[in-house]
Image (cartoon, rainbow, N blue to C red):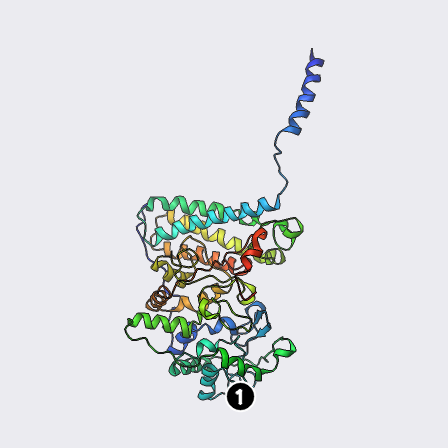
Amino acid sequence: MNRLCVRLLIPAIVLTAFSAPPLIAEMNVDGMIKYRQNVMKSLAGHVGAVDRLVRGQVPLVDQLEMHAMAARDIARTITTLFPADSIPPEAEFAGATVATEALPSIAEKPEEFEKAAQETIDATEELVKVVQAGNKQELPLAFKRVGESCKGCHKDFREKKE
Amino acid sequence: MCLAAVVVWAPAAAQTPTRGEYIFHASGCAACHTDVDNDGPPLAGGRALKTPFGTFYSPNITPDPVHGIGGWSDDEFVRALREGVAPDGSHYYPSFPYTSYTRMRREDMLAIKEYLFSRDPVAHPNRSHDLPWYLSFRQLLWFWKLMYFDEGEFEEVAGRPAAWNRGAYLVLALGHCAECHSPRNHLGAIDAGMRFAGTRSGPGGEAVPNITPDVQTGIGGWPRGDVVYFLQTGATPDGDYTGGEMAEVIDEGLSRLDRSDLEAMAEYLRSIPPVTHLIERPEKSSGDEAREKDPWE
């Protein structure tokens, strides 16, 4: 009986292993570029929402913390979004068929890029702290730091946006 | 948590700038005359401007008497900006935007000179432009000017509000916005009918957006307050932040201007004729069709 179970179980395991979606997918360069663009648009969306709230254009201040936290959480993933194969010119060799605004300087100056991304992480973390502390006076400066960090990174590592 | 609405960003400058410093920032001099990429000294030139005609290198505008402009008289300085002519009588290439600066008032030109002469001199030699041999004859620029250069100081338009005229002066003369935000013809002159309509081949090969008030392809869909806010901070209405050379223009120039001046610029920009001209970065599969629209290419 045990032997029968083993005989049935082994093929079942093998079949499952080869038919189920892989847990660790290989990178599809077009998919990576589009994923990155979507994630960065999400980040811009949350930053833009915080901006409107900070400027007092929208009375939904109870949503400020949610947007600040989302911006922080996304910012923490920035450095994972730019694998070398998805950045020009390597992206071309990897078969990319979609355009990307990521500049080669990301791969050429990895330390500077990581430093720039870290500034966005630090700035958004500080923003969350300020929001959670209910510190109205510090809020404009904390948000300004976020904006400056976005602009600083785009200045050196993103093709000019159309 | 309870956070009420707070305020917008304050201008970057902590101290009140002198008139010359203010005009200097409004004119965007620092962005081109400092070789930021190579950590060059401020205003000592050497910044590369890549164009389809070759690479131009900005000159040293510090008061160094040998390599800079320390030996220039007031009239020589004014002539450079008004006529595009150097003290030795040679013509400047239009990579130097005298085509816009010509509209600047003499007193503003001299205010800039006074500010520049208050800066430290830097003995940094100028670098020759890297151009094809047939473009090295500056005498040919006389013909170019004859065809494309409209010399003369800005004149206020009667019947328009003071803020509109101020905005026009800031955009057309000091800010020289059209120089980057317009497509150019095969001789490097701005396509007059497409002024401010953007180009896919701006300085450094970068796409430069359409800033006419066209709703679909320009900034016509931007609320006026968002135009002002963008000029002040670089933030677009959708939460994105500008990069590239515009970020420098904002950091080194526009963010230091008074809010009233930024509002005036927004008022003028929203009054110019809308031009439908899509400056969307083409997807690779459809790039050829999109590129055909740009006469510069």
Q: Nearer the viewer, residue B17 or B27?
A: B27
Residue shown at 45%/71% (left/top)? Answer: B192
Residue B31, above or below B78? above
Quarter of the image where the N terminus of chain B is located: top left
Horizontal relation, residue A101 to residue B160: left or right = right
Q: How many marks?
A: 1
What residue is shown with label 1? Answer: B89
Q: Nearer the viewer, residue B190 or B259?
A: B190
Quarter of the image where the C terminus of chain B is located: bottom right
Instruction: From the top left corner, tell me how far across and down residue B243 is, in percent.
Output: 49, 60
Horizontal relation, residue B45 to residue B272: left or right = right
Q: Nearer the viewer, residue A63 or A118?
A: A63
Q: Amino acid at mark 1?
A: Gly
Q: Is residue A106 visible?
A: yes
Query: Disc 1 on helix, strand or loop?
Result: loop
Q: Residues within 10 Å of mark 1 (few under 14, many from 20)?
A: few
Residue A11, above or below A150? above
Residue shown at 34%/60% (left/top)? Answer: B224
Instruction: From the top left corner, tell me how far across and down residue A133 is, in percent.
Output: 37, 48
Residue shown at 52%/49% (left/top)? Answer: A37
Instruction: From the top left corner, tell me how far across and down residue B69 is, in percent.
Output: 51, 84
Residue shown at 68%/25% (left/top)? Answer: A14
